[in-house]
Each structure stands twice: as C-alpha cells, then as structure tokens.
Amino acid sequence: MKRLVLVLLVSVGLSACDGAAAPLTGTSLPASTTAAAPTPSPTPNLPAGVVCQWARVRSVTDGDTIRVDFEAGPANQPVRYIGMDTPETVKPDTPVQPFGPEASRENARLVDGKRLCLERDVSERDRYDRLLRYVWLSDGTMVNEALVLAGLATVDTFPPDVKYVERFIAAQHVAREAGRGMWANP
C-alpha cells in the first residue's frame, strides 16, 4: 500500500512538472550473481506473482536438496528447498533417519530430470552455499509443500524466508491428521 501511494505521488508530481508520467511496467528484481535473472513465469499453472528462474534438475541429493543447470546461467548449482526439512540420508556423521529414504525417493519421483521454476524469497544462499528456493513443477505443484503434505517433511522456516509458511503449516496439519508418512501411527 505504501508503495502504491508513493507511486501515485511520484506520478502526480511528474505529471505536474512535465505534463506526463512514464508508464509503470512493474518492478524489476536485481539479477542474481550466481544464477540467471528471474523472469515472470509463462506457465499459466503457476500462481500469479511467482517469478521463476528456470532450470533443469541434474541430480537429486536427498529429500530437500537438488542440483540444477540453469537455462540461462550456471550449471551444477545446489538448491535447498525453503520452508521445510526432510530426515537426513547423506549428512556426514549422521545416520540415515527414519523416512529419509522415502523423502529422497519421493523428491526424485517429483523432480528428477524435469524443468523447474525456482522461486527466490529473500535470502539467496544458506550457510552451506546452496541456493534457497521454492520449487515449482510446470503443473503448479510446489514441491516443498507436496513433501510436507505427504508427511515426508516438516515445516522448518528461517526468517526472513517465510513467504509460504502458512501454506506449509496447513499442509503439515493435513498430513498429521491423515496419519501420512512420519505422522502414521505405529
């Protein structure tokens, strides 16, 4: 709202000064130094406002991490899914955790070899130098949310990257109530 008021004030001010304001064409995001510049999604199945960096999956590391080749940028980049966490399967000095292999298999089933829309929130990378992204399939499925809904991931957010936290919490509630994955009764 503040931005709209500011834009209107600037437009009115410009109109008063020279008789015409430049048309507004939307906002631009700074290009990432490590990946292709984001472009609005041409895919009608994605929610409005999703800005994509298009990439193809090179490999699946585990339930919440993949490696991608950007269509217009660097190759072999690690990507960590934002807002959720899956049980460990490849972390050094950590045993394979229950439901870790299932989460890895489901992640691979969803994304392996596919073209994905990678959406940034606020942070670019995590402390392990992995890109932080929401991962969308062309059919509009958000992979992060799908893994939580399947009971193979739990909500795990780190502000300021909280754009979809409400969706993740709702998905976890549904998974828990339905007894899916790690929420299944023994």
Image (tube, rainbow, N blue to C red):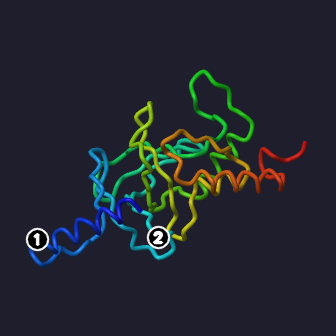
Identify the image quadrant of the C terminus.
Answer: top right
What whole-number distance in Å separates the C-alpha atoms at marks 1 and 2? 35 Å
Q: Would you say 56 lies left or right of 99 here? A: left
Q: Residue furthest top?
A: 93
Against 15, is 66 above or below? above
| Residue visible at 51% across and 74% down in the picture | 45
The amino acid sitting under disc 1 is Cys
Question: Viewer-nearest of labels 1 and 2?
Answer: 1
Q: In the image, residue 110 lies at what x, y percent?
A: 59, 58
Identify the secondary structure beneath mark 1: helix
Give whichever of 105, 3 is nearer the camera.
3
Callout 2: SS: loop
Return the x and y of residue 180 as percentages of the image width and height.
79, 52
Graded by Cα atoms within 10 Å as few (under 14), some (14 to 19) or many (20 or more), the crowding at tag 1 reads: few
Q: Based on the displayed image, in which of its 4 quarters is residue 164 positioned? A: bottom right
Q: Are marks 1 and 2 in contact (CB under 8 Å)?
A: no
Residue 22's image quarter? bottom left
Residue indicated by mark 2? 48
Asked which quadrant contains residue 149, the reply is bottom right
Looking at the image, residue 82 sits to the left or right of residue 69; the answer is right
Pick the front one: 130 or 18 = 18
**Residue 165 sits above or below residue 38 on the image:** above
Residue denoted by label 1: 17
Residue at the image point whose x is 60% and y is 21% from the top: 93
Q: Is residue 111 left or right of residue 168?
A: left
Q: Residues within 10 Å of mark 2 (few under 14, many from 20)?
A: few
Residue 126: give x, y in percent of width and height.
44, 36
Q: Amino acid at mark 2?
A: Ala
Classify the position of the N terminus by image quarter: bottom left
Q: Position of residue 144 (x, y in %)?
A: 58, 53
